[in-house]
Image (cartoon, coloured by chain):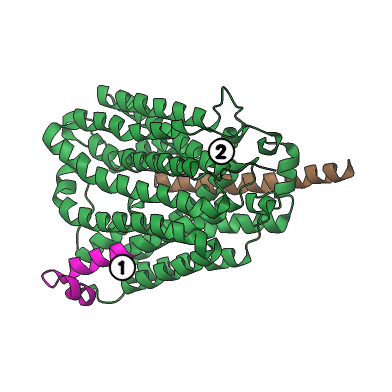
Chain colours: A green, B brown
């Protein structure tokens, strides 16, 4: 029988620690926004095309793409002096600091690219370690609150850093701004205070655990479809870029490719992203806790319905909605209001979806199964961005939103037919 | 073609392939487990 923590003081510390990791991750991951702007800064004189920059950023993110393989390594890690998941968190933090130091002390393209790769690989290691630690110890009826605290903190992190980092770049330059990324990385140390459960045979990866988990084709297939087709609301997350494309198209703005353009658009785009981010934080935390009371599956259906209804409001006249709250600029008012509503339902739905994935993690394969789920959500976000992007480029914004609505609504089906693994956490606990 | 697009397609195909292999391996191991 796996031992789960029930002590309120432990769960409180775990919530704060996990929230601190995700706050740090949200703020640190804005590196993905600022690195392209840094690379095209004329002071560096690197003379790069946009496709060169896309290549460098894609390579820097490679560990994130292969998190499901790294997840297996996390599960295979032995316990060393009471540290198992935290080994990944400590190593990840060292990588992040090292990566930032390489970026800010280099003027060569290769060194900057290596620095970004090290920093973002460290970020992925921290993310996996913290997720596994949370699912290792938390009871399933606490997944919503725990994961919600993480998602909410992440939203605060990226909302705050998007504004603070630009302020620092304008007033103090790139060196100080990059060094502040080390400060962004520090809250992660909070989770080191949390004691890990012992590595009992029930938590060890074994041939038997793999055989019992994945040999049933029906449950294995149902998990695959849950992972790959039910987390598509994430495609509208501000860090993915689709929301800013939709918002800026509605507002008639072009994509910012320089720091100057980024700064000129910041008041408007920052307002939209902040509206989404802060509402996602509220949705993730409050509705995450409510998800535990309501039931994870039911909460997923309700939040997905809310998300789809809000997204469909983007198809009607935004000025009509905006006129009610901000008659001075109804279009902007409408977009900010709907971004907020979308953020609320995205935060809630994503946390509800995460709880479903966390519930089915077998104790022996926690990190692999959870990270496979995360790989799946990146697929669904990619699918939405790719297909909607095509329709946006070749047709119009409303058709692109309609396509997004259709793809996201597919998410009902896998959840409806989903059956947990026989080795999953909720199955073992008889929930 | 866009490098991000190529990378995403590789990752998706690899993750699906790995999962299929895992299921096949699990089936083989499960048969062995039951026989034992």
Query: Disc 2 designates what residue?
Result: A71
Do we see residue A386 in this rendering?
no
Q: CA distance from mark 1 to mark 2?
A: 38 Å
The structure residue drawn at horizontal position 52% and vertical position 52%, both measured from the top left corner, is A142
- Left or right, A265 with reference to A389: left
| Quadrant in the picture for the C terminus of chain A | bottom right
- Seen at 67% across and 33% down, the residue is A200
Q: Residue at x 24, y 73 (%)?
A: A318
Establish whether labels 1 and 2 are both on one chain: yes
- Position above or below: A25 against A339: above
Main SS of the magenta part reads helix
Q: Are marks 1 and 2 in contact (CB under 8 Å)?
A: no
- Which chain's residue wears label 2? A
- Marks 1 and 2, the one that precedes in the sequence: 2
Circle 1 is placed at which residue position?
A397
The segment highlighted magenta reads: A319-341
Residue A350 appears at what percent x and percent y?
45, 57
Disc 2: CA contacts within 10 A as few (<14), some (14-19) or many (>=20): many
Q: Chain of mark 1?
A: A
Q: Quadrant of residue A334?
A: bottom left
For residue A315, which numbered disc appears in the image? none
Q: Quadrant of the N terminus of chain A?
A: top right
Q: Is residue A340 magenta?
A: yes
């Amino acid at each position: 029988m796996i031992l789960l923590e029930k002590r309120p003081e432990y769960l409180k510390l775990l919530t704060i620690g996990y929230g601190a990791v995700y706050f740090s991750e949200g703020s640190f991951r804005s590196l993905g926004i600022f690195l392209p702007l840094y690379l095209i800064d004329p002071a560096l004189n690197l003379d790069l095309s946009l496709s060169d920059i896309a290549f460098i950023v894609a390579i820097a993110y490679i560990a994130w793409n292969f998190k499901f393989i790294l997840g297996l390594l996390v599960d295979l890690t032995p316990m060393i002096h009471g540290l198992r998941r935290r080994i990944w968190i400590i190593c990840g933090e060292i990588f992040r600091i090292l990566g930032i130091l390489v970026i800010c002390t280099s003027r060569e393209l290769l060194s900057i690219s290596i620095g970004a790769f090290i920093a973002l690989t460290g970020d992925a290691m921290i993310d996996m370690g913290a997720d596994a630690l949370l699912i290792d110890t938390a009871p399933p009826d606490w997944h919503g609150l725990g994961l919600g605290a993480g998602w909410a903190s992440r939203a605060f992190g990226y909302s705050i850093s998007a504004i603070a980092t630009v302020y620092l770049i304008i007033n103090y330059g790139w060196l100080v701004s990059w060094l502040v990324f080390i400060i962004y990385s520090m809250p992660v140390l909070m989770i080191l205070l949390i004691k890990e459960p012992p590595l009992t045979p029930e938590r060890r990866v074994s041939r038997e655990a793999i055989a019992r988990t994945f040999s049933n084709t029906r449950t294995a297939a149902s998990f695959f479809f849950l992972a790959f087709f039910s987390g598509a609301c994430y495609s509208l997350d501000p860090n993915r870029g689709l929301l800013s494309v939709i918002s800026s198209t509605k507002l008639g703005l072009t994509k910012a490719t320089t720091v100057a353009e980024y700064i000129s658009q910041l008041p408007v785009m920052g307002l939209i992203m902040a509206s989404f981010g802060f509402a996602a934080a509220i949705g993730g935390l409050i509705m995450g806790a409510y998800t535990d009371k309501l039931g994870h599956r039911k909460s997923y259906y309700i939040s997905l319905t809310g998300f789809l209804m809000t997204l469909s409001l983007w198809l009607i006249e935004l000025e009509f909605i905006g006129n009610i709250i901000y008659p001075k600029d109804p279009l902007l008012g409408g977009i900010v209001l709907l971004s907020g509503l979308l953020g609320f339902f995205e935060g809630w739905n994503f946390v509800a979806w995460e709880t479903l994935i966390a519930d089915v993690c077998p104790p022996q394969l926690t990190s692999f199964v959870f990270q496979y789920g995360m790989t799946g959500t990146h697929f669904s976000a990619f699918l939405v961005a790719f297909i909607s992007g095509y329709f946006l480029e070749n047709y119009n914004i409303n058709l692109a939103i309609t396509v997004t609505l259709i793809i996201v609504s597919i998410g009902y089906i896998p959840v409806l037919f989903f059956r947990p693994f026989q080795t999953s956490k909720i199955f073992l606990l008889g929930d | 073609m866009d490098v991000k697009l190529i990378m995403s397609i590789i990752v998706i195909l690899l993750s699906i392939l790995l999962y299929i292999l895992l299921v096949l391996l699990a089936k083989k191991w499960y048969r062995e487990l039951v026989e034992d």
